[in-house]
Amino acid sequence: MRVRSAVALLCAFAPAVSGFALAPQLHAAPAANRHSRGVCVTHPTWPSARPSTSLRCAVETSTSRTKEEECDRKKLLPAQARQMLEQLAKEDKWEKNAVVEVLNAMQGEKGTGAMFNSSAILFRRTTRGEIQMLTRGVIKPNTIDLNGDDDMEVLNQAFYATLFSSMALSTVAAVVIPDVPDMPFLRDSVLRFVVTIGIGGLPFAFLGAGLSVPGLLQAALIQVRRLVSEEFRQRLVVHEAGHMLVGYCMGLPVADYSANDPILNACQFFEVDDDIAGRLDHQQVDVMCGISLAGVVAESIKFGDGVGGFADLSQLQGLISRATPRLNDKQQMERVRWGCVSAYTTIKRNEIAFDRLIEAMTAGASVPECIQILEESPRPSEK
């Protein structure tokens, strides 16, 4: 009887000992995890010699709530994160580690409640038929221009427009410009000849610019399209918004962006952490596939097709070439297809945030302002 009373007294005042004996794995886990799971240790004998189960569960539930409240107090609100990010930019400390530290602080200890780094990177082999099925028919084999056909069509149209315009204008100049007998060096028909030859040589100047300064020619064509097409202006913003949203959800924040610039429209991300030889592992390649294809996928969602993917795919090819172990052609295509599906899933899951981001980028919002808008947008479970 004395031994039995002693054991009962030990169980009453040392429940952690009996709990460890029944479930040793709980002893190795942190105390916060045991409380959050609502573990309630019970003993099969001597019920009157220890506190009741309901009382102990109530105590542990109260402790769990206290832990959750502490996590909530530590959680950084989007408005506070925006202020901290703006302070980093003001103090010229806009670096990846500092920015990511602020963004991670919005998650609290449990990693919940933040959109940043919320998309799981789970690569799976995807066939052409599966792309159309998984994207509900939005992405089809002919939906996305990954060969630069749209850019070539624009160049062809611009060249022929220049050619026919120069022919018409040079003809008009040859007829309209009169002889000028009193001007030095341009007397008689010399002026008419110079103007006619100059206008007629515009197509050759166009070809020369395409060969020597293609970037400048492309920027000029983009500016012309911006001036004459409202849809094209919207496409530029939607394209960059897709890059920013998917990159943010996959844990790679944007360093800067420009969506209404007449010369360059792009999202500039922080550098990916590679090894000393500049190599990327396959998970990093998967992230870059999703981010790179996000712009053209966003266009496909909003406009039914995507025409701005050639430059993104060319840049992605350079990143895939840095993968280790190396990927063969088939594996590269599988990852490009998966990038389309992953980008589509991320955008559709956060469609409200995506629409708000487009509005903010159209208005020229800063990167911290865009981050606040993303984090304050309703989640799918909150709709």
Image (cartoon, grey):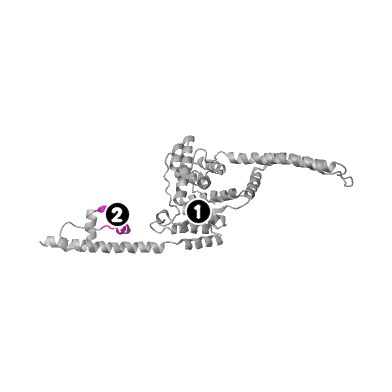
Quadrant of the rendered image containing residue 361: bottom right
| Residue linked to disc 2 | 28
Relative to the observer, which residue lies in front, 43 or 382?
382
Q: Residue 86 carries which label?
A: none
Q: Residue 355 carries which label?
A: 1
Amino acid type, mark 2: Ala
Q: Residue 12: give x, y in percent of width and height.
A: 19, 63
Q: Residue 316: give x, y in percent of width and height.
A: 53, 42
Amino acid type, mark 1: Asp
Q: Which residue is drawn at 42% across and 53% down?
A: 380
Looking at the rendering, the stretch of residues picked out in magenta corresponds to: 23-39
Q: Residue at x 40, y 64 (%)?
A: 73
Relative to the observer, which residue lies in front, 33 or 303?
303
Q: Residue 367: give x, y in percent of width and height.
A: 53, 57
Relative to the observer, which residue lies in front, 81 or 11?
81
Q: Which residue is drawn at 28% across and 55% down?
A: 27
Q: Say what secondary structure mark 2 lies in.
A: helix
Q: Is most of the magenta stretch helix, strand or loop?
A: helix
| Magenta-colored stretch includes residue 277 | no
